[in-house]
Amino acid sequence: MTDFDVDVKRLSASGSKRWETCPASWTLRYAYGLPETGFNQEALNFGSWIHEVFELGINANTTDVESLQQIAMKIRNKYGDMGEKIELAEPAIANFSRWFTNLIDAGCEVVGTEVRFSHDLDGDDHVAFGSIDLVLHHPPSDRYFVVDFKTSKKATQERWLKDDTQMLLYATIVQDLYGAKPSKIAVAHYLPHLDAQVKIEFTQRKLDSFRKRFVGRINLMREQGRLLDFKPNPLCDWCSYQEICPMMEAEPDVIEKVVKLGEEILQSGENRKQAWHKIRKAGRFPV
């Protein structure tokens, strides 16, 4: 384990989960800015594409199937190969159009798409940040509906969402930003290709407990710093840093070279993404 000082200025749900699963992966991604190798890039491309199709359609108030298909074709070249995933586009668009139309017909109004937030959870510099795919409000009942679009093979079971960091954070943010009571907030995964929705609500006690834990996580990360503490876990086979991980049989000196390069980048003050690109282009990346 290697320990460095680091200033964790703010934390996202995905960053929190990554640090909990493998501190080394968090350090490489968020502290050093090491680009990921794009494991399962086809699925990532498809997910990003479909997300943007829905966002553009909602914002333009054109969520009928034909309009969404036109948007999809227009921005298709922005994304790379999607393999067999591309076959899911047609049912995903049709299902989403019907699902969203039903919500609007029921009286829901769009608060925002890709709602970005950077919010101090306790007024003491513990900032959570992120982006919510879709926030809806139902004026007659004053209820909020928070949606995260997913394109995974299977829907997450409701029992797993009860302790999901992302869903808990989204509900907390909506409570703080819009003054909504937990009983008036529902958060959900929607998988358009499966036309599956998994929805859940949280109690005030649950959100208070989460807020305390999230703040505690930020404090712990600030205390422990940049950890190269590799932890074998069920997600190792999907990790983008397999090629340099000693747990995945990479040579021991590989990670040492990566860390040295990462420290050089941090000390230089150069844009991390651009710096790593130059390193790879120059053949200095040690793999």
Image (tube, helix red, strand yellow):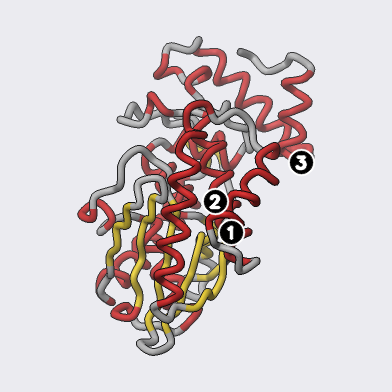
* Residue 60 figure quarter: bottom right
Q: Separation of disc 2 and disc 1 at Cα?
A: 6 Å
Which quadrant is home to the N terminus?
top left
Could you tell me which secondary element the residue under label 3 belongs to?
loop
Measured from the top left, where is residue 23 in percent x and y? 44, 38
Task: Looking at the image, tell me whether mark 3 or mark 2 is earlier in sequence order.
Answer: 2
Determine crowd level at label 2: few under 14, some 14-19, many 20+ residues with C-alpha closer than 10 A: some
Measured from the top left, where is residue 16 in percent x and y? 43, 50
Circle 2: residue type = His
Frontmost of labels 3 and 2 is: 2
The residue furthest front is 66
Q: Residue at x 68, y 45 (%)?
A: 75
Q: Is residue 215 visible?
A: no
Could you tell me which secondary element the residue under label 2 belongs to?
helix
Q: Which residue is mark 2?
A: 51
Q: Separation of disc 1 and disc 3 at Cα?
A: 29 Å
Q: Separation of disc 3 and disc 2 at Cα?
A: 27 Å
Q: Which residue is mark 1?
A: 55
Circle 1: residue type = Glu
Task: Looking at the image, tell me whether mark 1 or mark 3 is earlier in sequence order.
Answer: 1
